[in-house]
Image: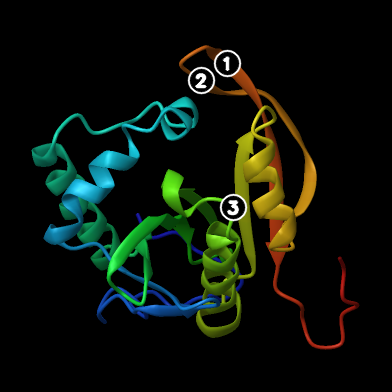
Amino acid sequence: MTRSVSTPPAIASGSLGGSPQPTLTAAAGLLLRPWGDADVPAFLSGYGDDEIRRWHTRRPDNESQVREWFDVYRQDWRDEKGGHWAITRDGAEVLGRIALRGWDFDDGVADAAYWVLPAARGAGVAAHALSALTAWALDEIGFHRLELEHSTRNPASCRVATKSRYVLEGIKRSAAVHDDGRHDMHLHARIRVEAGAPVRP
């Protein structure tokens, strides 16, 4: 059944999936690029880190599973469900992961997620990557609202969100399961500034 809507979609269907996933430039010499087969060991090593494992209950166990994930990532782009990027230094060394998922072209909404490898922490890598992805999504593609959630027990992720101007909107109680049980989640969001609208912090 075709759904009837009274307003046009925020983003036209077919505007992204029919084109190659772009490489995005971020501050400090960072490039966000699609994952490739050569990145499998680095991606898998991320999920061997205690801090990343603490906040991610869905984890690949071996390189074969990582390749399957990468296949899903490529299909997500073609199906216009999401985009997944390696955070790299000049396109080579993998420093982390960032994604924009749950694309809703009707309302112009999506949600962001990220992690950074231990050796790259403390240098603003996640914030630089998130700022670049956010600018692309809001200013170039036309998303209106980007959301970001993290455990209330994860202050590092909260700092990345606020540094990237994602406003803390509230707490979603007992909203996600982690290895040690259910966690309350902070909900942050960035909204595209409309012409003539006041700029909010």
Q: Which mark is residue 193?
A: none
Instruction: Give the class, few, some or many, for how many residues have Cα within 10 Å of label 3's Cα (few <14, many ≥20).
Output: few
The quarter of the picture where the C terminus appears is bottom right
Q: Residue 181 placed where, x, y %?
A: 54, 11
The quarter of the picture where the N terminus appears is bottom left
Amino acid bearing label 3: Gly
Quarter of the image for residue 18 reads: bottom left
Mark 3, secondary structure of its residue: loop
State how far apart marks 3 and 2 are (Cα): 27 Å
Q: Residue furthest left?
A: 64
**Badge 1 is on which residue?**
182
User: Closer to the camera: disc 3 or disc 1?
Assistant: 3
Q: Which mark is residue 177?
A: 2
Task: State which tag comes first along the sequence, 1 or 2.
Answer: 2
Q: Residue furthest top?
A: 181
Q: Residue furthest bottom?
A: 195
Q: Is residue 153 above or below residue 23?
A: above
- Seen from the viewer's position, the closer of residues 9 and 161 is 161
State how far apart marks 3 and 1 are (Cα): 28 Å
Residue at (53% x, 61% y) in the render:
125
- Seen from the viewer's position, the closer of residues 134 and 5 is 134
For residue 184, side relative to residue 97 (left or right): right
Amino acid bearing label 2: Val
**Badge 3 is on which residue?**
122
Amino acid bearing label 1: Arg
Q: Residue 192 placed where, x, y %?
A: 70, 73
Q: Count the marks: how many?
A: 3
Label 2 near label 1: C-beta < 8 Å?
yes
Task: State which tag comes first along the sequence, 3 or 2.
Answer: 3
